Image (cartoon, helix red, strand yellow):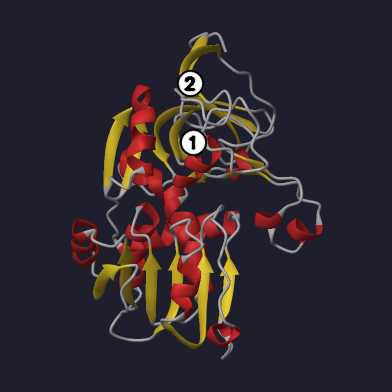
Amino acid sequence: MADFPEHYHAMVLEMPGAPLKMVERAMPSIGTDELLVEVLVCGVCRTDLHILDGEIPSALYPVVPGHEIIGRILAIGNEVTGFAVGERVGIPWLGHSCGTCSYCVNGQENLCDQPEFTGCTRDGGYASHVVANAQFCFPIPDRFPDAEAAPLLCAGLIGWRALRMTEEAKKIGFYGFGAAAHLLAQIAVWQGREVYAFTKPGDEAGQAFAQRLGCVWSGGSDEVPPALLDAAIIFAPVGELVPDALQIIRKGGRIICAGIHMSDIPGFPYADLWGERAIMSVANLTRTDGTEFLAAADASGIVPTVKTFKLSEANEALLLLREGKLQGAAVLVP
């Protein structure tokens, strides 16, 4: 470690509800299966808000948030293979899985009984440096600049898992047109699907943004689209949208709740669910999801929309996200 700085900087969340605070720490050591990564950029995700608000029961405090990390490898544990010093990598939400529980054994590591989550149960990327388990890092397609690559690591990846759960749906509604939806809309259009974008009522700028990205219709979440949909993905953490979405999907359609946290879903008549409609949730990601999505993101030609902030401006970026004042994704640059 002598060739590296003795200290690094990080924005630390001491406890739920507190503002992030810039601190200086001793440079961490790495385990045999880990990488030391210099953070180039880190995306700001709505999940970070849920951690800030104490809404993720598994979160450990104090913690350095951030799980949409793009960085350069500075050091490699002696049991790591397949990576080289200087290589650019992405570090996602799923930081480790046990590999032995029934879920891991059956290819469902996203449901692991003893997981670690980047920026939640282990320190994340709101920092100048981060340590990551090498098995849960991804090489990043060369065509994406650092800032544009960051939101792929969660907004894109979790969105991809949600999109796959809609199976062959041709007409898809996206509720909440933020970081995830703006990426997945481009992927879905590339796949030949019709995308219907639902924003906050009155958000004309957001609706225009959606149509520029190829959505065939956009409107407020209180509006009815011009056709019944095959599926709807709810990115907004608003449980009240689930009964609304049931009203605009066809028989046999699916509603996918794509957030890690959502407000309570209010009651609704069984008749609204009847007709083999289904409500499902997305939990975390697998490494296979990451490999498949990054290949699709590269091949599809999608262009992430980002706004960059200094690392010290993390609190400001989170506030803009909370207030719905961002188009695309916010990205921190150490």
Q: Amino acid at mark 1?
A: Gly
* Residue in the image at 51% along x and 74% along y: 255
Is residue 3 in view from this perspective? no
User: Residue 7 location, x and y as percent?
Assistant: 51, 10
The residue carrying pointer 1 sits among few (fewer than 14), some (14 to 19) or many (20 or more) residues within 10 Å by Cα, namely many
Is residue 320 in view from this perspective? yes
Image quadrant holding the N terminus, namely top right
Read off the residue under disc 1: 66
Is mark 2 in CB contact (under 8 Å) with mark 1? Answer: no
Which quadrant of the view contains residue 171?
A: bottom left
**Depth check: 248 or 296 in front?**
248
Q: In the rendered view, does 183 fall on the left or right side of 67?
A: left
In the rendered image, the vertical position of residue 37 relative to residue 160, given as above or below:
above
Image quadrant holding the C terminus, namely top left
* Residue in the image at 52% along x and 30% along y: 17
How far apart are the two marked residues, 2 and 1, measured between alpha carbons?
Answer: 11 Å
**Depth check: 241 or 131 in front?**
241
Q: In the rendered view, does 54 fall on the left or right side of 317?
A: right
Element type at mark 2: strand
User: Residue 285 location, x and y as percent?
Assistant: 58, 55
Read off the residue under disc 2: 10
